[in-house]
Amino acid sequence: MEAGQFAIQADLNVIHWIRSPYYLLTAEDTLDKIDIAKLHSTAQCISDLIASLMYILKKDY
């Protein structure tokens, strides 16, 4: 079950960025599933997103 309903009910602004492959959060979800070629760019994107969000004033959201 996804947690999206809780964010909606609590009137929270969220960014939902979890893709759902069939093996996510199961015993089949192992480190060999990581696409090493995309790991750096994905981590950089997430880091940039968090850094940008840190500058949003509380009154603006």
Image (cartoon, rainbow, N blue to C red):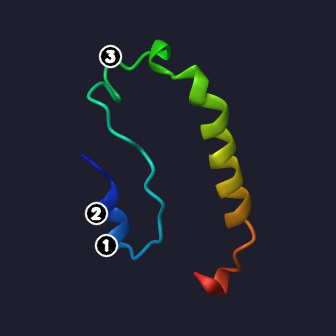
Which residue occupies the extreme top position in the image? 32
Instruction: Say which amino acid is labelled 2.
Output: Gln
Which residue occupies the extreme front position in the image? 37
Residue denoted by label 1: 9
Instruction: Say which amino acid is labelled 1.
Output: Gln
Q: Nearer the viewer, residue 18 or 26?
A: 18
Q: Please tell me which residue is depicted at 31% across the width and 32% down the height of the picture.
A: 21
Q: Position of residue 38 (x, y in %)?
A: 58, 30
Residue denoted by label 2: 5
Mark 3 vs mark 2: which is more N-terminal? 2
Q: Nearer the viewer, mark 1 or mark 3?
A: 3
Q: Looking at the image, do the residues carrying marks 1 and 2 touch, with CB atoms under 8 Å apart?
A: yes
Which residue occupies the extreme bottom position in the image? 59
Quadrant assignment for the C terminus: bottom right
Instruction: Say which amino acid is labelled 3.
Output: Ala
Q: Please tell me which residue is depicted at 50% across the width and 15% down the height of the picture.
A: 31
Q: Nearer the viewer, residue 11 or 50?
A: 50
Q: Which element type, helix, strand or loop, lies under badge 1?
A: helix
The correct choice, above or below, for 39 with respect to 31 in the image is below
Residue denoted by label 3: 27
Q: Separation of disc 1 and disc 3 at Cα?
A: 31 Å
Q: Which element type, helix, strand or loop, lies under badge 3?
A: loop
Q: Badge 3: how crowded within 10 Å, few (<14), some, or many (20+)?
A: few
Q: Badge 1: how crowded within 10 Å, few (<14), some, or many (20+)?
A: few
Q: Position of residue 40 (x, y in %)?
A: 67, 32
Mark 1 vs mark 3: which is more N-terminal? 1
Q: Which element type, helix, strand or loop, lies under badge 2?
A: helix
Q: Please tell me which residue is depicted at 69% across the width and 75% down the height of the picture.
A: 56
In the visual, does 5 lie left or right of 14? Answer: left
In the visual, does 54 lie left or right of 6? Answer: right
Q: Separation of disc 3 and disc 2 at Cα?
A: 26 Å
The correct choice, above or below, for 55 with respect to 36 in the image is below
